[in-house]
Image (spheres, rainbow, N blue to C red):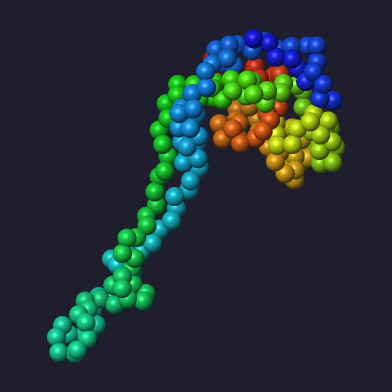
Amino acid sequence: MELALTTATGKVSKKTVELPDVIFATDFNEDLVHQAVIAYLAGARAGTRAHKSRSEVQGGGKKPWRQKGTGRARAGTIRSPIWRGGGRTFASKPQDYTQKLNKKMYRAAMRSIMSELVRQERLMVVEDFKMDAPKTRELDGKLKALGVDSVLVVTHDLNEALYMSARNLFKVGLCEVGYVDPVSLVRFEKVIITVSALKKLEESLA
């Protein structure tokens, strides 16, 4: 299939780029895409929370008072979970939330997402997308000319001036093609990708 290039003014160019059907014309597998998104979000969780159990809290080696005859409830340690300063009953420990997702499944999910972007006309291919100087206002005008609001810009190589220009813009994401992820592709309304980045993406998803 062919997709027309978009010019810097937001108009459709006469030039086209060839898109392989195996990547950009597959059926949308909602369950697989959902699994890929959940696995990606789960892998981003730190899981570094930790509480101390009664065996880890310092002190409490001596019985506070004798077992009988005081009129008070029985107590074996001042570090009991029901005491102030005691350990937690169900103490949280560092956890690994990562989920295993096969490479074939991940690539299939990415192909499904890219195909859906083409069908919904959310994918825009441009010749190049760079900034000569870090000018946020200039980049904002450039995006308005393209008629996009919430957009992910995918480039072959990260341009520092482009990064500096985009970091303060709301609903504007920027990443190299090697770091593109399913969450970003789904979250943004539009995806702008350069021709060179598109070729590299095709190689990785083929």
Task: Find residue 135 and report its image quarter.
Answer: top right
Give the residue at x 28% y 72%.
80
Toward the viewer: 21 or 53?
21
- List the single residue furthest toward the bottom: 70
Q: Position of residue 187 (x, y in %)?
A: 61, 36
Q: Is residue 162 above or below residue 3?
A: below
| x, y percent for residue 3 | 70, 14
Asked whether residue 5 appears in the rendered view, the answer is yes
Residue 27 position in % (x across, y down): 52, 18
Q: Is residue 187 rendered to the left or right of residue 171?
A: left
Residue 178, located in which quarter of the rendered image? top right
- Looking at the picture, how far across and down is residue 151, in whole percent? 70, 34
Is residue 127 visible from the viewing direction of this image? Answer: no
Q: Residue at x 48, y 46 (%)?
A: 45
- Residue at coordinates 74% horizontally, 15% vertically from top-left? 4
Q: Give the residue at x 50% y 40%.
A: 41
